[in-house]
Each structure stands twice: as structure tokens, then as C-alpha cells.
């Protein structure tokens, strides 16, 4: 409920000089309106006028918004079950006071809101609704008059008016549709005002707000030449394609295309769509960064193909895109803060010197990091506290050729961070742990092993023979893979071991009594892939390997947004340099971990 202190008596209203309120300037922004009302008179010199200005300011404490096909008042803020004021919160005394004020105020920028609020609380008062519509029409006329009067001296502030006028046009039409029947033709004043504004903007090629105005003309006033609306929109877009924000120009081209198409002009519609698509090429060529050019060229190619663009142009753009993707690899470098792991390296070397082969392997297995969703959640929550913008920006993942392969939404902190969001956020720094483990534990252990022990192919022969997770027919494959890994041949180890992860999962899945066969149509069958095992069979995989191990395998080998090593290798994208990345080395160590862990109590015999 509104404080009754704002309400003016009839005696106070009769003493007010209403010409003061004629000085409120042309603006469609409620914050500007409240500011003007706060400064319009001195409270000491003109107490009654100041009291009225304060009351009118309350009418701008709620937002006028377009929701769907309706223009409605919405609260400025919502706090749980509470909200800020709306017109429905005004009591009878307040509404009666507003009704008296509406008979005195003549400035349409104030009168429209006064009459509108009165009508919101009394929908039967048709006269006040018509008065509100007429006031909205006067606002539109005054705006168009301003364009004509300023002519060549139109400033950016003048043009910004059109960014907010759409809500007021929509509101006038909304009340019009509730008061007048369809057959009546509606309020002539609002109709003439919208036509006047449209013709003025079209004549002077004023781009701001013209797309919305074109849509209004085509929807509410179809008796006019609809094709002319499309031609005007196309001409406006053409005049501003190098001057205005490209997305707004594209939207105007697409509006023109839709009107052309609805009125039997498919060729003209296609021309506008291709003009819209070609803007992507201009934006791409104007980007200084190659990754940005890749993104915009990709969009241009997609839209040109969708709209039936020239095949030669598309082929030329595809060639440019391929060349840029090659160049983009060298454009970005990692800006990093080095982590000092010298103490970890020294500690590892010191603890493993003069130890048996079994002890070295046990130490590496004990230090191998395995992911846990709750630990990941804690880390993400700490990161969110340090980086408040993580709730504003999502995550995009590009592959080595610049292709966008994964997209994650910004974190929704208010609703709580679910497991999927935790994983997407955690994957941004996922590889740091691998770098610390590989360089601080595995490499020192491998160095000690090479100095103090004789590593041969037979070193792992008993391990691969007795490991329950390795099929007998794959013993030699794993034996060679582990030998290459501990030898430091990471290309050989990666290409031998990484493809085995899917087979290992499937083999252990079958050993647990599950069926790892997919039954296809036409009585065909195939082996279940790692993606399906980690998705549709996740509960079974977690019961076999543990929830933490299943999560770790998924993040390293399968999860989009992560390294997806299994897919990289399967599709020929695991290039030589990536084989030396710490995460790739970690993947090979994880396979060693899975094969060796069940035999841990017997390491002294296996590595005698």
C-alpha cells in the first residue's frame, strides 16, 4: 500500500501552477522521468508543486514491459514472496487523487502514465482509457516533430529516444485493443501518430527502432502496401549496413524477407536473407583476431547454405576457413602463473631412491589422482567466490582447429550448482592437477626407475598375465603399451593404450554378468561403445569400478568439454604434440592404475 502522505487534497490541487510540468522534456526512460520530476521545482519555494512531482514520481516505480503479445506493468524488483509496488497497490483515495490530477495535467509524457494507472484500477472507465491512448499518440507525435524540427542537427541523444519508445507504442496499442472492437478500426489518433512516425523515420532514414515499427505496421495496418513495408525495410538496412550494429541490421533484413515471402515475393525474400548472411563476412573480415574470424566465417557459411547462396562463394569461404584454422593454432598462447613443484619433485626422488621396482609402482599408484564430485563441487564453489563473473559468462570449448565443440551455460548460483554445471566449470582447470602429478610424481619416479632398475618388455609380463581386467588375447598389447609409457615414449604409449580403455570397460562389464551387446534393427548386433557404457549403463559401471573411477574415466576419455581422448584418437585428431600433454600421459597412467590396482598386494611377486 502507498503512503497517504503523497495524496493531495482538492484545495492543494487548486493552488498548483500546472504550467511548471510542461517543462518535462521528451523522454521514454523512466529513470530520466524520475530525475526530471525530482529537479523540476524547489520544495521550499513551491511545496505543493514539489508534492505533486513526488506523487507523479511514484508512478514510475514500476516497469512498462512487453511480454508476449501484451504490454504490461511489472514490478521493479522481487524479493522472494515480496515485490515492489504496482498500480493495483493504489487505494481508492490515491486513484481519486490521480483522477483529479488527470483533469489538470496536459503534458502527454505525464498524462499518459496518470490515465494508464487509473485505467489499470478501473477497466470500466472507457473515457480515461481513451485519454491514455490519446496521450500516448501525442507522445509519438511530439517525437516525430522533434525529428522534423532538428532535421540535420539530430544528435545521438535524440536517436536514443527510439530505443525506449517501442514499449509506449505497444502500450497504446494494447489499451486500444481492449477498448475498441476489431471492426471499429480503433483509435484514429494512435493510428495517425504511428503512421506519422513511420513515414518520418523512413523519409529521414532513421534506423533506431525502425525494425519494430515495420513489424507494427505490417501487423496492425495490413491495408497499406505490405510490399512497400518490405521495400522500405530493405532500403533502410542497406543504408545502414556499414554504420550500425550488425545484428540489428541483419534483423531488419530478415523482417523484410518475411514480409516479402508472405506476400508472394520469394526471390526478394531470398535476396534479403543473403544480404543478411553476407554481413557475417564483413564482420569476419573486420576482426583482428583469427579465432573471431573463424567463428564469423563459420556462421556465414552456415547461413549462406541455408538460404541457397552462391556455391562458388561458399567454397571460397570454406577454403578461407580451413586456412584460418591452421593459422589459429599459433595465435593463442597460454598465459600462465608457474607453480613451483620443486619440493614435490625432490620429495618424490628422495622417497623412491634405493627402493624396489614394486615400491616405485606402488608409490605412483598411491599418488594417482582420482576425481570426486564433492571435492570438485567444493573447488568450484571456492572459484565462484573468487570470480563473481562466472555467473555471467558461459564456457565455450574449441578444438585444435578452432571448431566450437562444446558450450556450457553460465552458473546459476541462485538455484544451486548441479553436478553437470560443476563438471563443466571444473573442466576449465582440469589439467592443472595432471600437470602437477605427471611432473611432480610420475616423471621423477620414471627417472629413478631408469637409473636404478633395468626396464624391459618382460618387466610387465606377469602384470598383464594376471590382471583380471585384461583379456588374454590383449596381453602383448598392454605389455608393449606399459613398456612404452615407462620408457617415456608417449606417442607409442598413447596410441597403444588409449584405445584399450573402451575394451577394458566392456570386458569388466561382461565379467560382472552384464550384457555388453547392442541389438540393432534387422537382427544385427554390435559392441556397446564407451559413450553408451558411461551414459546409459552408468549405475552398473559405478557399481563395478566405483563412482569416483567412473567419473574420472568419463572426464578424461569421453566427456564433451574435456580432453575426449578416446574420440580424438579414434577420429585421427590426436596429433604428436598432444601425446606429450600431461593429461594424455595421465590417461595412460590411469589405464596402468586400473590394470595394476587389483594386484597391489602381490606386487613383490609380480615385479620380483
Image (cartoon, rainbow, N blue to C red):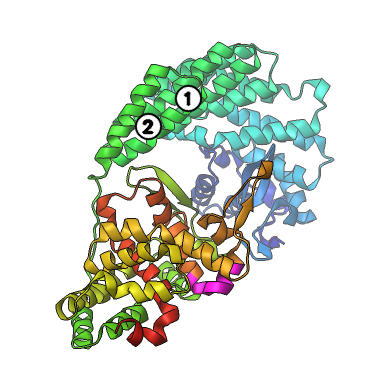
Judge by depth and name the residue closer to the eye, 443 or 73. Answer: 443
Mark 2 secondary-structure assignment: helix
Q: Tell whether 115 sits left or right of 376.
A: right
Q: Residue 488 location in percent, x, y?
A: 22, 65
Furthest toward the right, the residue is 124
Furthest toward the left, the residue is 451
Judge by depth and name the residue closer to the eye, 250 or 53. Answer: 250
Quadrant of res 556: bottom left
The residue carrying mark 2 is: 297
Q: Residue 590 location in percent, x, y?
A: 38, 69
Q: Which residues are magenta?
A: 540-549
Q: In what quadrant of the picture does the N terminus appear?
A: bottom right
Q: Tell whether 150 sits left or right of 413.
A: left
Q: In what quadrant of the picture does the C terminus appear?
A: bottom left
The residue carrying mark 1 is: 305
| 1 vs 2, front mark | 1
Q: Is residue 19 visible?
A: yes
Q: Tell whether 61 sits left or right of 397.
A: right
Q: Residue 61 location in percent, x, y?
A: 61, 53
Amino acid at each position: 500500500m502507498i503512503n497517504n502522505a503523497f495524496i493531495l487534497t482538492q484545495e492543494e490541487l487548486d493552488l498548483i501552477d500546472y504550467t511548471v510540468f510542461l517543462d518535462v522534456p521528451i523522454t521514454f526512460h523512466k529513470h530520466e522521468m524520475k530525475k526530471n520530476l525530482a529537479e523540476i521545482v524547489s520544495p521550499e519555494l513551491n511545496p505543493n508543486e514539489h508534492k505533486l512531482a513526488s506523487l507523479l514520481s511514484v508512478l514510475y516505480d514500476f516497469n512498462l514491459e512487453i511480454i508476449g503479445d501484451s504490454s504490461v506493468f511489472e514490478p521493479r524488483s522481487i524479493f522472494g514472496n515480496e515485490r515492489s509496488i504496482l498500480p493495483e497497490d493504489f487505494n481508492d483515495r490515491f486513484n481519486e487523487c490521480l483522477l483529479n490530477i488527470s483533469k489538470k495535467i496536459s503534458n502527454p509524457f505525464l498524462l499518459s502514465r496518470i490515465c494508464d494507472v487509473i485505467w489499470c484500477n478501473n477497466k470500466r472507465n472507457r473515457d480515461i482509457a481513451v485519454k491514455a491512448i490519446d496521450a500516448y499518440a501525442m507522445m509519438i507525435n511530439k517525437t516525430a516533430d522533434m525529428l522534423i524540427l532538428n532535421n540535420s542537427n539530430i544528435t545521438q541523444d535524440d536517436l536514443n529516444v527510439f530505443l525506449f519508445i517501442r514499449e509506449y507504442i505497444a502500450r497504446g496499442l494494447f489499451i486500444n485493443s481492449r477498448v475498441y472492437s476489431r471492426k471499429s478500426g480503433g483509435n484514429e489518433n494512435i493510428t495517425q501518430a504511428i503512421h506519422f512516425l513511420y513515414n518520418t523515420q523512413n523519409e529521414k532514414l532513421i534506423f533506431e527502432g525502425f525494425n519494430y515499427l515495420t513489424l507494427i505496421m505490417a501487423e496492425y495496418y495490413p491495408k497499406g502496401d505490405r510490399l512497400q513495408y518490405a521495400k522500405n525495410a530493405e532500403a533502410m538496412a542497406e543504408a545502414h549496413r556499414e554504420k550500425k550494429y550488425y545484428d540489428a541490421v541483419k534483423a531488419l533484413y530478415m523482417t523484410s524477407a518475411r514480409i516479402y515471402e508472405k506476400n508472394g515475393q520469394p526471390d526478394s525474400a531470398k535476396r534479403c536473407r543473403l544480404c543478411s548472411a553476407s554481413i557475417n563476412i564483413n564482420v569476419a573480415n573486420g576482426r583482428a583476431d583469427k579465432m573471431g574470424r573463424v567463428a564469423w566465417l563459420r556462421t556465414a557459411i552456415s547461413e549462406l547454405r541455408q538460404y541457397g547462396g552462391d556455391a562458388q562463394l561458399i567454397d571460397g569461404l570454406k577454403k578461407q576457413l580451413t586456412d584460418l584454422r591452421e593459422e589459429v593454432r599459433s595465435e593463442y598462447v597460454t598465459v600462465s602463473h608457474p607453480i613451483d613443484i620443486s619440493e614435490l619433485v625432490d620429495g618424490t626422488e628422495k622417497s623412491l631412491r634405493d627402493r624396489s621396482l614394486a615400491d616405485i609402482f606402488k608409490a605412483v599408484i598411491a599418488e594417482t589422482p582420482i576425481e570426486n564430485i564433492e571435492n570438485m563441487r567444493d573447488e568450484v564453489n571456492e572459484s565462484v567466490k573468487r570470480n563473481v563473473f562466472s555467473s555471467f559468462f558461459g564456457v565455450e570449448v574449441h578444438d585444435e582447429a578452432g571448431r566450437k565443440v562444446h558450450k556450457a551455460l553460465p552458473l546459476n548460483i541462485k538455484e544451486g550448482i548441479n553436478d553437470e554445471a560443476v563438471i563443466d566449470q571444473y573442466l576449465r582447470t582440469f589439467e592443472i592437477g595432471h600437470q602437477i602429478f605427471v611432473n611432480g610424481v610420475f616423471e621423477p619416479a620414471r627417472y629413478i626407475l631408469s637409473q636404478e632398475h633395468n626396464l624391459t618388455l618382460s618387466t610387465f609380463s606377469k602384470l598383464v598375465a594376471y590382471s583380471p581386467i585384461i583379456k588374454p588375447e590383449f596381453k602383448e598389447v598392454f605389455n608393449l603399451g606399459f613398456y612404452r609409457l615407462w620408457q617415456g615414449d608417449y606417442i607409442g604409449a598413447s596410441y597403444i593404450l588409449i584405445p584399450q580403455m573402451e575394451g577394458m570397460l566392456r570386458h569388466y562389464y561382461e565379467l560382472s554378468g552384464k550384457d555388453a551387446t547392442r541389438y540393432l534393427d534387422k537382427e544385427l548386433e554390435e559392441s556397446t561403445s564407451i559413450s553408451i557404457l558411461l551414459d546409459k549403463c552408468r549405475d552398473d559401471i559405478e557399481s563395478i569400478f566405483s563412482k569416483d573411477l567412473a567419473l574420472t574415466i568419463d572426464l578424461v576419455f569421453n566427456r564433451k568439454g574435456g580432453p575426449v581422448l578416446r574420440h580424438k584418437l579414434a577420429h585421427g585428431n590426436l596429433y604428436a604434440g598432444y601425446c606429450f600433454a600431461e593429461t594424455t600421459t595421465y590417461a595412460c597412467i590411469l589405464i596402468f592404475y586400473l590394470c595394476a590396482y587389483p594386484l597391489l598386494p602381490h606386487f613383490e611377486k609380480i615385479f620380483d
